[in-house]
Image (tube, helix red, strand yellow):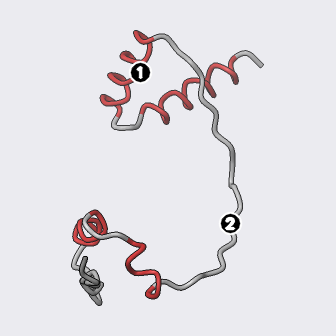
Amino acid sequence: MTNRKKVVEPIPDEFDSYEQAAEFWDTHDTTDYLDDFETVQYASSLQGRQFEIEIPEELVRTLRQKARQSGITVNELATILLRRQIAATR
């Protein structure tokens, strides 16, 4: 058995794009670079909560179609429609 050290490619000083950085880290093990990382303190707070609800598949298809036509996401459209409906029933 030989005592060979693993050759570790250095981390580039800069990446030209997020894709290039992602490709590097997809092909390299972060545990080989522990000495290059530093611990940082970070605080965050939740700005709101989101919930999932179950809805029938045919309704999802219709929502997707309408959202595409409106140029918004399905989540945005569903929120708009729910707010309108709730406001109408008050």
In the image, which disc is placed on residue 73?
A: none
Determine whether 6 is above or below 69 in the image: below
| Element class at badge 2 | loop
Place residue 10 in its image quadrant. Answer: bottom left
* 33 left or right of 13 in image: right
* 77 left or right of 79 in image: left
Residue 30: x and y in percent read: 39, 72
Name the residue located 29 percent from the left edge and 66 percent from the top edge: 22
Residue 63: x and y in percent read: 41, 21
Name the residue located 29 percent from the left edge and 90 percent from the top edge: 13
Q: Kindly identify the amino acid type of the residue bearing the numbered disc 1.
A: Leu
Few, some or many residues within 10 Å of mark 1 (<14, 14–19, 20+): some
Determine whether 89 is above or below 21 in the image: above
* 4 left or right of 37 in image: left
Return the residue nearer the eye: 69 or 12: 12
| Element class at badge 1 | helix
Q: Which residue is mark 1?
A: 63
Q: Furthest residue to the front?
A: 1
Q: Which residue is mark 2?
A: 44
* Image quarter (top left, top right, bottom left or bottom right) of the N terminus: bottom left
Residue 74: x and y in percent read: 43, 31
